[in-house]
Amino acid sequence: MSIPAPDPRSFLPLTPAAFHILLALAEGERHGYGISKEVKDRTDGAVRLGPGTLYRSIKQLLGDGWIEESDERADPDLDDQRRRYYRLSPLGRRIAAAEAARLADLVDLARARRLLPGADPA
């Protein structure tokens, strides 16, 4: 008998740090500094994950099974063996998608209430 997969919506809402980390890993595996740099670059510097927040969040996401540590390296000869690489787990991907949908619904509501550009005039 298999255990049913949890409903990803039961984990929402996510903290901003957790969502940014999951987004950074959505395109492939990265090490901690790579995650931090991706978040900073994607947000034009508006969001910066300091080492404490980043690694505390990674530890939590690993423990919850949302991300996994990867043993593979793109080029093992060039990579520092102390670096740990992370990737989304299947559950983590479902949770990230559920959070993105939740946030999209909120943006739609804000547009409907004319709080954002692009709202249809009534």
Image (cartoon, rainbow, N blue to C red):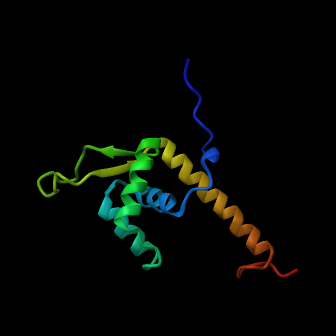
Position of residue 13 in the picture relative to residue 22 (left or right): right
Q: Residue furthest right?
A: 122
Q: Residue furthest top?
A: 1
Q: Residue at x 22, y 53 (%)?
A: 74
For the N terminus, which image quadrant?
Answer: top right
Residue 112 in which image quadrant: bottom right
Q: Residue furthest front?
A: 52
Image location of residue 27, percent across then percent down: 41, 57
User: 14 or 78: nearer the eye?
Assistant: 14
Image location of residue 61, percent across then percent down: 44, 48
Q: Residue at x 76, y 78 (%)?
A: 119
Residue 109 in which image quadrant: bottom right
Q: Is residue 22 above or below residue 7?
A: below
Image location of residue 51, percent across then percent down: 34, 64
For the C terminus, which image quadrant?
Answer: bottom right
Image location of residue 78, percent across then percent down: 13, 58
Q: Residue at x 64, y 47 (%)?
A: 9
Q: Residue furthest left?
A: 77
Q: Is residue 89 above or below residue 20?
A: above
Position of residue 34 in the picture relative to residue 3 (left or right): left
Position of residue 31 in the picture relative to residue 39 (left or right): left
Q: Residue at x 60, y 47 (%)?
A: 11
Query: How many marks do you count on the picture?
Result: 0
